[in-house]
Amino acid sequence: MATMTKEAEKAQEEARASNTKIVRELSPFSSSQPSTTHEDGSRKPSTTDRRGMETSKFHTSCSREHAASLKCITENYEQKSMCQPFFNRYKKCKREEHEKILEQNAQGGKRSLF
């Protein structure tokens, strides 16, 4: 087995270091900036508007029902009818939440959904 010269060893070490740096720079998990794409390559919705300001977020007390219905539709995208119970629970929750808001507005009180 031939021994490598010091110059060849140094060149090989530099090449390894360069490759490691490139891999780190290209890794989607290495940057401190949040990724703008999902794992499948589709774009994530922006959290800032065109002025660079944070967009508002709609908060609801039906987040569990909402998440469950989305999970169901993701898993059963070809048979949406299987998710009807989840949709019904979410619709019922939203209806009750809306009625509660209307009632509070009629009384002139502040809203408190949580």
Image (cartoon, rainbow, N blue to C red):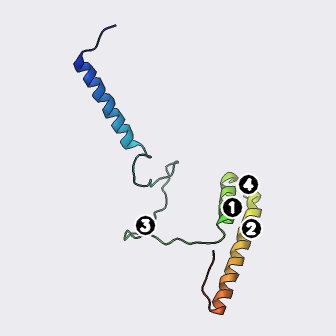
Q: Tell me whether the residue at label 1 lies in contact with that at label 3, contact meaning CB atoms closer than 8 angstroms.
A: no
> Residue at the left extreme?
7
Lower position in the chain sequence, tag 2 or tag 1? 1
At horizontal 62% and vertical 89% (from top left) the residue drawn is 109
Q: Position of residue 16 (x, y in %)?
A: 33, 29
Quarter occupied by the N terminus = top left
Displayed quadrant of residue 71: bottom right
Q: Which residue is mark 2?
A: 89
* Above or below, comparing residue 62 to residue 99 in the picture: above
Lower position in the chain sequence, tag 4 or tag 3? 3
Q: Tell me whether the residue at label 2 lies in contact with that at label 3, contact meaning CB atoms closer than 8 angstroms.
A: no
Crowding at dot 3, Cα within 10 Å, few <14 / some 14-19 / many 20+, comes out as few
Lower position in the chain sequence, tag 4 or tag 1? 1
Crowding at dot 1, Cα within 10 Å, few <14 / some 14-19 / many 20+, comes out as many
Q: Position of residue 43 (x, y in %)?
A: 48, 56
At horizontal 34% and vertical 38% (from top left) the residue drawn is 22
> Residue at the bottom extreme?
107
The disc label shown at residue 79, or none? 4
Q: Which residue is mark 1?
A: 69
Q: Tell me whether the residue at label 2 lies in contact with that at label 1, contact meaning CB atoms closer than 8 angstroms.
A: yes
Q: Secondary structure at mark 4?
A: loop
Distance between the alpha carbons at the discs numbered 2 and 3? 31 Å
Q: Which residue is mark 3?
A: 48
Q: Quick check: 82 left or right of 6?
A: right
| Amino acid found under the numbered disc labelled 2 | Arg
Q: Secondary structure at mark 3?
A: loop
